[in-house]
Amino acid sequence: VCETPMNETLRNDERLRALCLSGSIPVKEYIKMLTDAGFGTIEIRARRSYRVLSPNHYPTDELIHIESIEIAAIKDPMPKDGPCVFTGKTAIYYGDEEFIDDGKGHVLVQNQPLAVCDKTAAALSGVSEQIHISESTWHYNGGGCC
């Protein structure tokens, strides 16, 4: 994947095609393609730098950073409120009660991390000021405490 659009010259470069680089697209576009195909759960399990296309080696005006991502796409029923996309966000409740329940199936025990999809992370951020939502780590292993 890459967040910088590639020009047509790069897209049609046989050398880049052989390296599986010419078809790189933004991660959001890739996820949309998967969810449009009916995958209701997307887990981004890893994301790491792969290559750069630099102006001194390729016909581009800017540096293009290409990343490799590992995704598990699960073809389960699409939730009514949209797909669950896990990018490695974690929710941690740090209030005074033993737990907090959002009433939608998410129970956060005090000071115990819970792996959440991006949609749930956004919803939980409005439930209580005493819930910390981490940034995306681009690593997801199913959650758990250990």
Image (cartoon, rainbow, N blue to C red):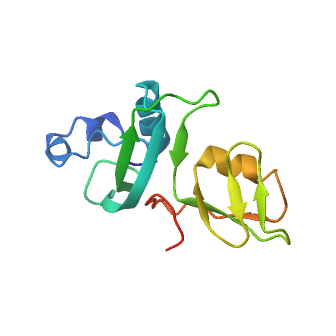
Across and down, in percent, residue 7 comes to 36, 38
- Corner quadrant of residue 23: top left
Query: Is residue 127 in sight in this rendering?
Result: yes
The residue shown at (67%, 52%) is: 121
Residue located farthest toward the front when viewing the structure as drawn: 98
Question: Does residue 38 appear left or right of residue 126 in this picture?
Answer: left
User: Looking at the image, which is closer to me, 60 or 22?
Assistant: 22
- Above or below, comparing residue 115 to residue 61 in the picture: below
Q: Nearer the viewer, residue 142 or 24?
A: 142
Q: Quarter of the image holding residue 63?
A: bottom left
Residue visible at 43% across and 52% down? 44
Q: Which residue is pictured at 70% across the width and 73% down the height? A: 111
On screen, residue 95 versus residue 92, left or right, reads right
Q: Residue at x 18, y 41 (%)?
A: 17
For residue 62, say whether it is visible. no
Image coordinates for residue 110, horizontal then vertical, percent: 73, 70
x and y percent of residue 30 in the render?
Answer: 41, 38
